[in-house]
Image (cartoon, rainbow, N blue to C red):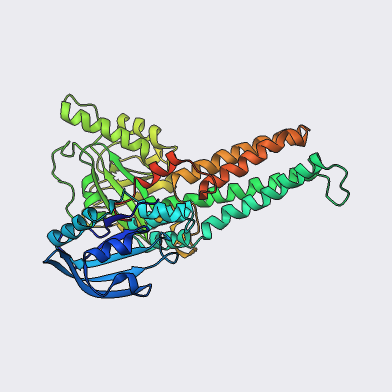
């Protein structure tokens, strides 16, 4: 933390401007060595200064330099941002000069890591920085904003605040039983408190499912026998010729992916190879990939041919997916009907002709209903959305259920106080009240360089 770090904070390549960020105790002094203009050591904080980056007598670039003095910066350290022209050569040359003048190249996410370690943001807010960078929809951006503002952290802090009151009261009862002005915590008193905490955690977990949908989208797998119109459906949904379409069965031999947005929620659509028994080695590899993608999907679109009778393969395939969220798509309704649909629940069936576009809007509307997208669209998205936090919360829920069972079986409260405290500490790992270096290194390594 005593080192001064630097990195290019904008995407490498040709552009109007590029920004090189510097942070640390010597950031202003180091930049001042290579800057020709005002003496940066004497300028006011949060000012933009015009001048040139120079290497001895050679002018490297005409720049604007923003000087921001601690503690009112993102990292809470002295920070300088150099705005150069956006070419690769001048940007890299400025970075090179900084490195030879006393800076160290920042690790991925190190600026944000310093902001966390210096108390500027908590761990949830740090994760929201990366979510904001990766946001592809307005809903994703709004959810990241709410997490960055501290709204999500408050959910966890409120839980921990209520738990510490319980822990403190139990400790006083144990250590100072003679105090008359402190409520005696009995099993009967503690059980409803624990139940209430459990319900709040359950609600956050349930709401977090919406956060996962907003952040990651809905993994949608298109499956079916060869030549039923899976690739045509993908192309129609994407409104582009993403997959090759022919009348030859088995044309798609690998997965083809694309994304669409339904009311601000991403559908990650995967067109799979037609699932059937085959002696073709390449096609059989595609079939196995299809089966793997099926396991990972949130939504399955099983495409059937209206002009063909239902096969045993389709019946077997349906048995594998019927417990997943799925839609039966009867394609080619413009052809004579030969398909007996009595095998499938009628409420899961959408009839369409991908060739004419009939039924596409009905399919999108059904997906909206299945995942309650209309409600998600109108809500303020204050949810946990990353797998790490949700996993911790689920473990806490399991532990608090165990405590509830123990209380109902009259296990003494003093034997459960440590378990309650452990849950309190685990909740603290969600927003970084408790953390270890290994977790931080792993988490921030996923950040882009310069952020």
Q: Is residue 143 left or right of residue 250?
A: right
Q: Quadrant of residue 15?
A: bottom left
Q: Residue at x 29, y 40 (%)?
A: 223
- Give the percent coordinates (x, y) of residue 200: 62, 50
* Residue 28 position by quadrant: bottom left
Say whether residue 394 is left or right of residue 274: right
Q: Image point 20% across, 40% down: which residue? A: 227
Whether residue 371 appears in this view of the structure is no
From this view, report whether residue 328 is shown above or below residue 63: above
**Relative to the observer, which residue lies in front, 33 or 226?**
33
Left of 404 or right of it: where is 346?
Answer: left
Q: Is residue 290 left or right of residue 68?
A: left
What is the number of callouts on the image?
Answer: 0
Please say whether residue 10 is visible from this viewpoint: yes
Residue occupying image coordinates x 27% and y 75%: 49
Residue 179's spot in the image, x, y percent? 86, 47
Q: Quadrant of residue 74?
A: bottom left
């Amino acid at each position: 933390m005593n080192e001064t770090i630097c990195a290019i904070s904008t995407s490498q390549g040709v552009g109007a401007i590029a920004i090189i960020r510097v942070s640390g105790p010597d950031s202003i002094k180091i930049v001042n060595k290579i800057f020709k203009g005002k003496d940066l050591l004497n300028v006011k904080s949060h000012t933009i200064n015009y001048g040139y980056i120079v290497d001895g007598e050679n002018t490297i670039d005409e720049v604007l330099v923003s000087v921001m003095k601690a503690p009112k910066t993102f990292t809470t350290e002295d920070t300088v941002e150099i705005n150069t022209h956006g070419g690769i050569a001048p940007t890299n040359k400025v970075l090179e000069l900084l490195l030879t003048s006393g800076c160290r190249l920042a690790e991925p996410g190190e600026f944000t890591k310093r902001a966390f370690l210096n108390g500027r943001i908590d761990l949830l807010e740090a994760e929201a920085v990366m979510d904001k960078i990766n946001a592809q929809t307005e809903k994703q951006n709004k959810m990241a904003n709410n997490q960055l503002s501290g709204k999500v952290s408050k959910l966890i802090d409120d839980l921990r605040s209520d738990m510490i009151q319980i822990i403190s009261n139990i400790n006083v009862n144990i250590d100072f039983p003679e105090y008359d002005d402190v409520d005696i915590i009995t099993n009967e008193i503690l059980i409803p408190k624990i139940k209430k905490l459990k319900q709040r955690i359950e609600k956050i977990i349930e709401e977090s499912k919406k956060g996962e949908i907003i952040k990651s989208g809905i993994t949608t797998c298109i499956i079916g026998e060869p030549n039923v119109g899976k690739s045509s459906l993908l192309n129609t949904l994407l409104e582009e010729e993403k997959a090759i379409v022919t009348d030859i069965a088995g044309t798609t031999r690998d997965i083809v992916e694309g994304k669409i947005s339904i009311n601000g929620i991403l559908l990650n659509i995967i067109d799979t190879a037609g699932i059937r028994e085959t002696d073709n080695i390449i096609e059989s590899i595609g079939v196995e990939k299809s089966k793997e993608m099926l396991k990972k999907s949130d939504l399955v679109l099983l495409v059937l041919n209206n002009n063909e009778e239902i096969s045993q393969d389709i019946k077997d395939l349906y048995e594998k997916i019927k417990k997943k969220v799925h839609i039966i798509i009867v394609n080619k309704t413009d052809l004579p009907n030969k398909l007996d649909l009595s095998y499938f629940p009628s409420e899961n069936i959408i009839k369409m002709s991908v060739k004419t576009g009939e039924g596409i809007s009905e399919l999108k509307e059904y997906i909206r209903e299945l995942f309650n997208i209309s409600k998600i669209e109108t809500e303020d998205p204050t949810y946990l959305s990353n797998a790490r936090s949700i996993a911790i919360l689920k473990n806490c829920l399991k532990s608090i259920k165990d405590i509830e069972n123990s209380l109902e079986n009259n296990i003494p409260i003093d034997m459960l106080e440590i378990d309650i405290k452990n849950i309190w500490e685990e909740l603290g790992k969600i927003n970084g009240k408790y953390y270890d270096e290994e977790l931080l290194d792993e988490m921030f390594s996923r950040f882009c360089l310069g952020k």
